[in-house]
Image (cartoon, rainbow, N blue to C red):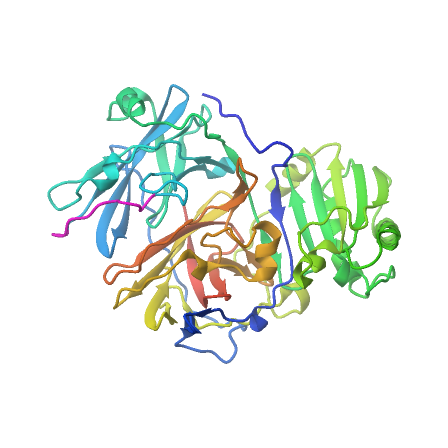
Amino acid sequence: MKSTLRSPSGLPRRSLLSLLSLCAAGTGLAACSGGPLWQATDSTDDSSSSVASPAVSAPPVPTADASGAVALESALDGVAATFRVGPATVQDGYTIVRVEVSTDSDEELTLSSTFSAPSSPYSMRGMRLLSLRQSLVFPELGDRSDEMFDEISRLSSVEVFPVFEAVDDGVETVELFLPSVGVAVGVPVVDPEDAGFKVGEMLSVAEIDREADPGPFRLSSLVVATDGSYDTDADEDSTTVTVSGDVTFGSDSTELSAQADEVLAKVVEQLTLYPSGGELSVTGHTDDVDEEDYNQDLSERRARAVADRLGELTDLTHWDTTVRGKGEAEPRAEGTSDEARAVNRRVEVELTPKNPAEATALSATATAPSAPADTSSTSAGQVPRSVGPVGTGADGVDVRINDQTVHLSMESVTRVGDYVTGSLLLSTQEDVNITVSLFALPDELQILHWPASFSAVHNPTLLEGGARYLAANYLDAEGEYVPVTNRSVREIVRGEAMRLPIIWPYPGGETITLDLPGKNLAARLTDIPVAQA
């Protein structure tokens, strides 16, 4: 079966590389019930410096057994449980996956709302099927909830069968995101007769929501630089480099700043990927502070200044160039806050190459760095200081949440194509009530993609030099950017660690650094090894 890529009407499918300012050291801490929501119990004098660490190696990545199941060792409400995921199979236009849940504990468990989405409690709508090598994500479509309350014990396991749109013919393996459990990678896609369960029967009782947009949706990547100088937004046909007006120009000025050439070098990098050239559009934008006519003129003159300088920095002979200004007419972020206005002051340089495949051919010959880049330089290469405790992924760190100590750790991540996936582990000696707002982003990041009302586990990010990699996300049928993370969280229960699985774009290197930049929760875990799927 062939799957058709879907996106909301009028909204582009894009792979977004956004580099906006983030002053982690100056971020305030939210309060809860009059007291601090979290506080560090460890500290560091200079968390931004790189410290040589002993070599670390990732544990083996679980692989499918003879029945086609990938085993994830996880937990339900603090009790150890095993989730055997797979195989997947395609029939009647749908992909269906078997998930068996078991435990060796004497306690009696249920799935309850483990896999639910905010709008669909006691369902599996929080699950997502992924084809990471195709950068595609498929939402779960079933509404059946019977199995969510079936008993799981030493004597009885539970099987559930989430349903998704059919993956493409020829796809041999997929990934399954299970909220609060983990990400099963390398789940085999088999013929229905080899699935080991009655595919037609399971589809007939799945209560499929046929009104929901089944996708698939294109994954995009949001990468944030600490100096706020530019962002790059790329899809299959074009690339837009957005240059920050505050970094490239002085206030109310059309004179390029001393830093402008460093920023415009990022545009030049994109231009050199396409020797055959194409169409080049340079568009200026302003905030809404001054009069409309003044802003229109300023945006046009800034666009012209950028276009002229690009012509001096590189050969634009093969590029058909258009220069224009939009004034305040097309804000990138709504509102009149300082953060929104800073985002709106920008110049966008859009490249539509004659031969988009030229960039693919060049990238195919490039190799990812085997170690993190040197972070001793200034500007975009500067690693921001952590505002929370710092430790290795294996050792973890302690933080205080609602007056209780919670231990954070991450053993490893797994690379699949251009992405890595891992789970943040949270363990405690006492039950701790939390909400998903604990994992909110700082305002200057939230405002770009997500309204204040949007909740998810946003905060775990990856650091590489001065770049911050946020969770991979996609534009859903309602026009919201949805990260591939938990949309809700459960109580942290004493016992086995709670797991918060996340998928990020791969930043390169043999190890990664996990950073929670700190609005309501801050910490940093270093030297986390990357395993290859």
Q: Report x, y in % for residue 25.
A: 57, 72
Q: Is residue 78 left or right of residue 460?
A: left
Q: Is residue 207 magenta?
A: no
Quarter of the image where one finds residue 444:
bottom right
In this rendering, the answer to whether 280 lies above or below 264 is above
* Residue displayed at 24% across by 26% down: 196
Number of numbered callouts drawn: 0
For the N terminus, give its image quadrant. Answer: top left
Residue nearest the viewer, comparing 19 with 59: 19
Q: Is residue 314 left or right of residue 512?
A: right
Q: Report x, y in % for residue 485.
A: 44, 49
Q: Is residue 149 left or right of residue 397?
A: left
Q: Is residue 35 left or right of residue 66?
A: right
Secondary structure mostly taken by the magenta-highlighted segment of the chain: loop
Q: Report x, y in % for residue 410.
A: 38, 60
Q: Report x, y in % for residue 215.
A: 49, 31
For the C terminus, give its image quadrant. Answer: top left
In this rendering, the answer to whether 181 lies above or below 236 is below
Quarter of the image where one finds residue 204:
top left
In this rendering, the answer to whether 343 lies above or below 354 is below
Residue nearest the viewer, comparing 263 with 314: 263
Q: Which residues are magenta?
A: 105-115
Q: Is residue 110 magenta?
A: yes
In this rendering, the answer to whether 128 lies above or below 457 is above
